[in-house]
Amino acid sequence: MSTNVLAKEFERLAQRNAQLLHTDEGDGKSIAQSHELATEFDNNLTRLEEIKNLLEKADRFDTVQAWAATPERKAAAFAADTPAPREQKSRTPGRQILDSAEFKSWLAAVAPHGQISDGARVQSPKINIKDVLVTGASGSGGAFFRTDYDDGYVPYVRAQLTVRDLVLNATTDADVVEYTRAVAHTNVAAETAEATTSADPAISGASPGPYTVAAASGVKPEGEFTWVKVTTTVNPIAEGATITRRALMNGGQLQSIIDDELRYDLAARLNSQMIAGNGTDPNIRGIRNTTGILTQAFSNNIIETLRKGKTKVTNPATGSGKIPTAAVLNPTDMETLDLFRVGGSTTTDGPFLLNPYGDRPQRIWGMTLVEEPGMTAAKAVVGFFRDATLWDRQVATVEIFDQHKDFAARNLLYMLAEWWGAFGVRQPKSFCDCSTA
């Protein structure tokens, strides 16, 4: 860039700074505009210093010095008389900065006699003004601050394995479900010798009896089975939530959040009903309240008790003869089991019996451990859970209505989550209700 161009730029910047100093351009402007003018003034001073250095190198700064010495140009390079004083509160923050004694003192040190001195401090000093730019005030600095809002949410913790995952899942399209329940069975299976004759069984004895019937050759033994028909009604589990239409429109993912939470609430209630529902309509009759299930009293500790419960189910003389697939415990009993140490203590030092670093679900005595918040305290259910069936008539769905009461007129919406179905235990002796304390 030529020295003539540099000299003209120097003159233009000096005149602009003089205008910023001795005019009322800052009055009546917003904080943002006043701040821009103050920033422009600082940037101009920096550029003036750069041009000065370039002109000195080009041996032309003497021309600029002569220009600056003329009376009509001196006002463009240093602070002149202060304008008539005004009430401090009537001036903008930008004007307060330019008129402050600290700023004028600094400017005189940077550009004495109309030129920027060597080694001058380019950065302006800290200047106190009466009107402070504050973050919280909407009419001050707060107007420039934005809130960074994270619209994500943390859902409630979901168990990885639930009671529903253990039982047999089926469907129905009826309002009432009838199913057969095994009540008793006598196992008489035995080895049978080959038949030696085709003759009918021999009957001996005189009339009117009694008669003796000799067993026929090669006859197989016959087992005995007893079933009963059980009827259960399909009922709903439901939960609703009221929300304004505006909130749903402005909330973005709010509808999905409520939908997810309502579905979870239904699932949690269904799990607790399958375990301990009392069967009084419209309640589900849960496993623990089903007639004919086995029971096991507390025996020394929770681990031993669970094993004895498993034995009762597995033993054909007492249970169904099926090997239990899972044990359902509430969180407190699960903690007791997790903290159980080798040697039988839950407090003294020693390795934990169950591996705390192992993958879930954990297993004990070959049974999957299920931690269920809806499980009755101090109780555990051990069983072959495929001998219980859950019938879905309507899977959990969420619908939105505005016809409730005067909701349409008030722009209110009702979100309803609902599940319809039934539950039943087909073989009570496949389950054992264990006391854990």
Image (cartoon, grey):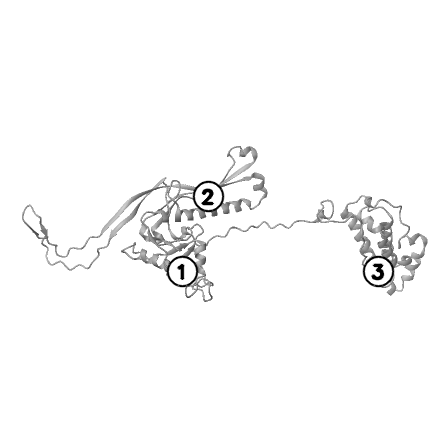
Report the side of 188 relative to 310 (left or right): left
Between marks 3 and 2 in the image, the one whose residue lies nearer the viewer:
2
Residue wearing tag 1: 363
Asked which secondary structure carries label 2, the reply is strand
Residue at the left extreme?
A: 206
Which of the numbered marks, if any, corresponds to residue 97?
none
Residue at left offset 82%, top offset 55%: 44
Q: Give how far apart the Cα atoms at labels 2 and 1 are.
A: 33 Å
Which residue is under mark 2? Answer: 397
Q: Is residue 78 above or below residue 248?
A: below
Q: Residue 89: give x, y in percent of width and height.
A: 81, 45
Disc nearer the start of the sequence (1/3): 3
Q: Is residue 255 above or below residue 315?
A: above
Picture quadrant where residue 117 is located: bottom right
Quarter in which the N terminus is drawn: bottom right
The image position of residue 283, as x and y in percent, is 40, 42
